[in-house]
Amino acid sequence: MKKVHSLIIFLLLLKLSLVLCSFHEASCFWRINHNKTLEDNVKRSCGFILFTLPVHLVEDYFRVLLNFALPVNIYQYVLVMLFAIEEINKHPNLLPNSTLGFAFLGDQCDITVANFNNLNMFSKYGKMLPNYICEYSDCDVALTGPTWTASAQVGTLLQLFTFPQVTYGPFHDSLSGHDMFPHIYQVASKDTSLVLAMVSLMIHFSWNWVGLVILGDDQGVQFLLDVRGEMKINGVCLAFVNVIPVNMQLYIQRAETYYHQIMTSSANVVILYGNLNSTLEVSFRRWQTLGIRRLWVTTSQWDAISRTRDFSTDSFHGTFTFSHHYQEIPTFKHFIQKISVSAYPEGVSLLRLGWIYFNCSVSVSDCKTLNHCSSNTSLEWLPWHNFDMAMNDEHYNIYNAVYAVAHAFHNMQLQQLDINVMESWKGMTLKCLQVNTFLKNLKFVNPVGDPVNINQTEKVDAMYDILTVLNFLQGYVLKVKIGQFYPYFSHDQQLFVYEDMIEWATGSRQLSNSVCSIPCYPGFKKSHQEGKADCCFDCSRCPENEISNTTDMELCVKCPEDWYANAEQTYCLPKAVTFLAYEDPLGMALVCMALCFSALTALVLGVFVKHKDTPIVKANNCTLSYILLISLTFCFLCPLLFIGNPNTTTCILQQITFGTLFSVALSTVLAKTITVLLAFRITVPERRMRGLLVSRVPKYIIPICTLVQIILCGIWLKTSPPFVDTDVHSEHGHITITCSKGSVTAFYCVLGYLGSLALASFLVAFLARNLPDRFNEAKFLTFSMLVFCSVWVTFLPVYHSTKGKVMVAVEVFSILSSSAGLLGCIFIPKCYIILLRPDRNSIQKFKDKTFN
């Protein structure tokens, strides 16, 4: 426990020291920036003049040149310039007879419009008077940047004198026009693939809801148009667009609106595009101060601006930069570490370096002077973790630009004529034309091994390195390369992300999402919200038998008829073929019922045959009873045709057999009721009714009624017979093989004819229900017809509300239940008397009871 307490106290003291240090730094920072406006904090454009001079003048020249303090915001430009010139001057085969030198273009490398009067391309130390030539000299080359506006302003003046100008800022189409700027050359690569590279990164990490902050100049507007088009193709949406005006006063008026817009947006990823030394940089620094935490996707010039002293393990807040070049130059690192104060007394601006590298850890009184540093002190011991040893694009362009000028001077010296050119205005113009000629189509390989092409028309898109900046305690910064983009590869192979480096840098291979809506996973589809961007949507389940097997599908895909969707609706499965089989529980139950009822009917027939001489059998016309029992036996066996794998034969036999057998049964019942009615209505033996009864006319009813049904079935078979059909919708995941009725009208005609026979039997039996006879079966016939009609009337709505095997089972059940109704209502009471109450099956018993 003591060790734990000691560790906690140590961490608290360490944290307190960091807080005090940050307070001290902030205090020193505001002392340096005392009485400066927001516009003063904007990084100034920096220009140089490159020329050759004799070797013996080098030492005196640099002493005069660097004998003043440089602004804080351009010291890295000067260090890169010093490194490149020192490397060139030590090269034995490049400019062997002369030395490359440089001067500042403008007041302390400031080439704003206010300092245009100080531009001096004719004298290294004097002042330039407009329209006057103060001194003749060899042709010098201007090196301008980092913004295209500064280069254009200088180029407008320099083109009057054919002076060559090389820009080290980002490539801009406006500077490549030979009509307006014939002597401006750009060393930077084109950024025509930058939009595609950024959008490809969005797609890789599934960021479809991003913000965009651009500078409101021509280049920013063109970037907005390009990025909108590419995002629309790839399904990425802009959550907001902040167009920061170039004018500082206009920006100050709208600054709160821009801040509110980015703070209230749900987008966690923001694309940042524009120049550093602009109102865009002022806005970005303000947002950092106000604590806006986003993942910024931008170009390499912003990586230093986006750094922070706060140590954070949050994987989703930081900066992803796209750089044309990311490679440490070992000689540059050695140059920075070994540079001494005595070599460049004031040129590296120790006052500014002291604030940058000491982090204001010196006393406040030392913020203005660093007299305690000796003249021969080396800068190797300074904490160089804030200085990027791997040059960004801007610094690397300065490095290449210096080498391009050196190669142009070198080629001109090699082709120099032996005749002396008169040092006059005409002579200087001629030399400048020569330098322009060599610069126009200059190609070379720099010491790093990269090819450099100054030709504007032959520039091709270079690949991009994707970098992220990690901030550690005490301001230590580590730049990590997490991927590359190759514009000349095929579309699906252009972006390559180092997943292991992302996991090492952030702790996870997959960064958090920046989306407007949660993804619609497989089984769901997107439902767009009216009036909102395409990336804002709701998720709804796919309709029945439709699937979606990928994320964020616009529409669900319907499964084929013989396939069905799984429960999650993510893929289709082939449907299993099914029918009302004997092995199914339902089919087995129906078969058992059919066999049992048919056996029971046969048993009843046997009872009637055995007791055919008894009064109850004779009184009910035993012949008609036998016919009815036999027809009912076959009616009970008829459902066996409905069970099993259907084919054309069984489909036809199902309906024909059903219609014919039931016609026989119902016509027999009709004949029995008519016989009963005729028997009890005869009062005079000589009357016509007795003749009808004696002539056995009721027995002809059976063949006549059955013949009518056979004719109807024949018409059915002739017009549209039943056939084998498949039902793919009734049962989920199954294709049910059923027998289609063919002509539905014919089916209902057959069924209607059976209904008419049943209704006629019911009416006749109803009329004879109260006739006086112990063995009168009119009441039983009435109930049997009532049961039959009830079954088939109920059958119709139930049949139409079911599908597949259940529909077949409903028809089978109706056949069995109606047949059982006939059997039960007509014959079960008689069997009860025959088997259990034989005492009642006697005419004598009936007569005695009647007379008593």
Image (tube, helix red, strand yellow):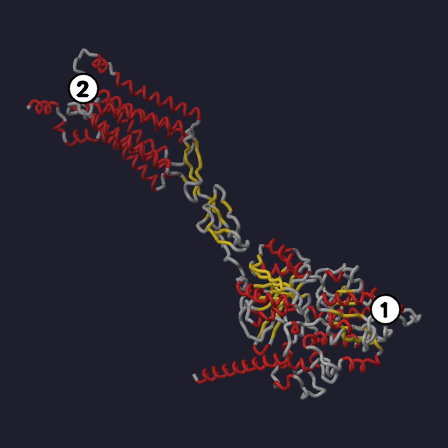
Farthest top residue in view: 686
Which is closer to the viewer, label 2 or label 1? 1
In the depicted structure, whether residue 237 falls above or below residue 686: below
Horizontal relation, residue 367 to residue 127: left or right: left
- Three-letter code, disc 1: Met
Q: Nearer the viewer, residue 697 or 244?
A: 244
Tell me if residue 581 can be seen.
Answer: no
Q: Relative to 484, is 114 on the left or the right?
A: right
Percent x, y for residue 504?
56, 69
Residue that sits furthest to the right in the current view: 419
Q: Mark 1 sits on what residue?
A: 412
In the picture of the structure, the residue carrying the numbered disc 2 is 680
The image shows residue 503 at horizontal and vertical percentages of: 56, 67
Q: Nearer the viewer, residue 54 or 707?
A: 54
Residue 359: image quadrant is: bottom right
Q: Vertical placement of 642 versus 329: above or below?
A: above
Of callouts 2 and 1, the N-terminal one: 1
Q: Quadrant of residue 706?
A: top left
Q: Position of residue 298 (x, y in %)?
A: 63, 65
Q: Nearer the viewer, residue 797 or 179?
A: 179
Task: Name the residue rendered at 42%, 25% in the picture.
Answer: 717
Give me the C-alpha separation between circle 2 and circle 1: 143 Å
CB under 8 Å between discs 2 and 1: no
Decide if residue 659 is on the left or right side of residue 412. left
Q: Residue type at mark 2: give it.
A: Phe
Vertical relation: 691 (above or below) 778: above
